[in-house]
Image: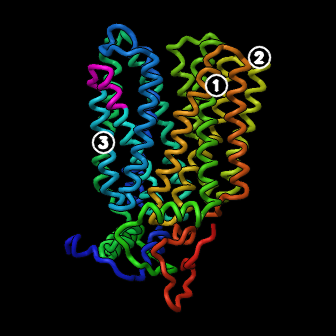
Amino acid sequence: MSQAAESTTGTITTKVPARLDRLPWSRWHWMIVIGLGTVWILDGLEVTVVGNIAARLSEDGSGLPITDAQVTGVAAALYVAGACSGALFFGRLTDRYGRKRLFLITLAVYLAATALTAVSFSVWWFFLFRFLTGFGIGGEYAAINSAIDELIPSKYRGRVDLIINGSYWLGAMGGALLSVVALNTDIFPKDVGWRLTFALGVVLGLVILLVRRHVPESPRWMFIHGRSQGAEQLVDGVERQIEAETGRALPEPEGAITIEQRRSTGFVEIARTLFRSYPKRAALGFALFIGQAFLYNAITFGFGSILVKFFDVSSGSTGYFFAAIAFGNFLGPLLLGRFFDTIGRRPMIAGTYILSGLLLFVTAWFFSNGWLNATTMTVCWAVVLFFASAGASSAYLTVSEIFPMETRAMSIAFFYAIGTAAGGISGPLLFADLTASGVVGDAVLAFCVGASLMVLAGLVAVFFAVAAERKSLEAIATPLSARQAQGDSTPGAPAPAASP
């Protein structure tokens, strides 16, 4: 049947969500994780590489007439602006036209922009394609997080989402080490090494694109948007594949949902849903994203300057220290992720936010008293970010699961844009001068600001976080299209109204 013929709206009752949530982990789920999740490695690689090669780009002979301030200031701001714009633009399209179509388009935008950055011949060209690279990456956050949460079983959703978002730091670690090699003029000429770092991102992206082509559309999106037959057929195929893989019949799914299908959801309805129907959840999203943005900027904006100015570390060696911090960031979601599904969302979100903030206060105290050297300072940062990274990743998990299906991608995009703007605009304005001044008290103040906002966000989570662990997305936030099936008392069937 053609897509046009299949895309007809009406009222249907389906068990697709329950069928997806009761699936055991399988090779099919690994394909989703690899095809969709690995793009965060590229994001981490992008951001870290540009920061670390700024000094090389500004040198005579780099092939690009650009200053260090233009790379770390203007180009970084344009990348952030592109990410915010891309998230909002593609987030809207993802909710309207589907996850699969958009997560292919956003990756294609990223690949093209990165490839064209590598061949930059002038400053305006470099600026333009840094903006477009961010535009593609921002769109990825909305399309990928919504697709992952809708495809991964509820039992594993928390840990998988955290680890995938935390994989950003694998890219950051690789970017830090790659920059050490790229900056070595004994290996590459000045005008070649930095271009190869961008080219590597293109190669990795092409590999991801090949895998991503086989990742299916979200069946949840399909049955709401008039493609219920395609959704049923897709899940049928996945179930047959998993039964053949495990050699066991799957248990019967529990719970059905009745949907009045729709083509799209308007901006007014999305805004009303976020801020009128779910005001406490919206406040939670704001708090989590702002808190993690400021904590990370308090550390990362001062990272290089503090090591160089206070501990006499050479600028060419800071990449090794950053790699150690990035590794700690990745270990946090990897080792703590499963507790978000077992201990629960509220205690883990609140705990990681509050603990990381308190540990940064302790680090600021140690630093102000002169008790740290370059190594111990890096260890303190790594410990703080071990917990903060799990918390920051849970912010993306939270906003992708606590709002209704029809608004999911746009909700992710909105809160991502808020956090990214806070980090990329307010962060530099607040922290750049403090951490570059060379005055101990200024750096301590930066740490305390980031730590305070992180603790405050954790306190908001104590009261407003949603106990979403091991629950169907439809039970956490009833779809706007849902109707209670008459006489349906099946366990797991969502109620027609949702609490804020």
Q: Position of residue 212 (x, y in %)?
A: 32, 51
Majority secondary structure of the magenta segment? helix
Please state which of the two labelled residues, at mark 2 or mark 3, is closer to the viewer: 3
In magenta stretch: residue 129: yes
Q: Residue furthest left?
A: 2
> What's the amino acid at mark 3?
Val
Amino acid type of disc 2? Gly
Q: Residues within 10 Å of mark 3 (few under 14, many from 20)?
A: some
Q: Amino acid at mark 1?
A: Thr
Neighbor class of circle 1 (other Cα within 10 Å; few <14, some 14-19, many 20+) is some
Residue at label 1? 378
Give the quarter of the image for residue 453. Answer: top right
Judge the density around disc 2: few (<14), some (14-19), many (≥20) Cα neighbours within 10 Å: few
Magenta stretch in the rendered image:
118-130
x and y percent of residue 112 in the render?
Answer: 27, 37
Looking at the rendering, which quadrant does residue 127 occupy?
Answer: top left
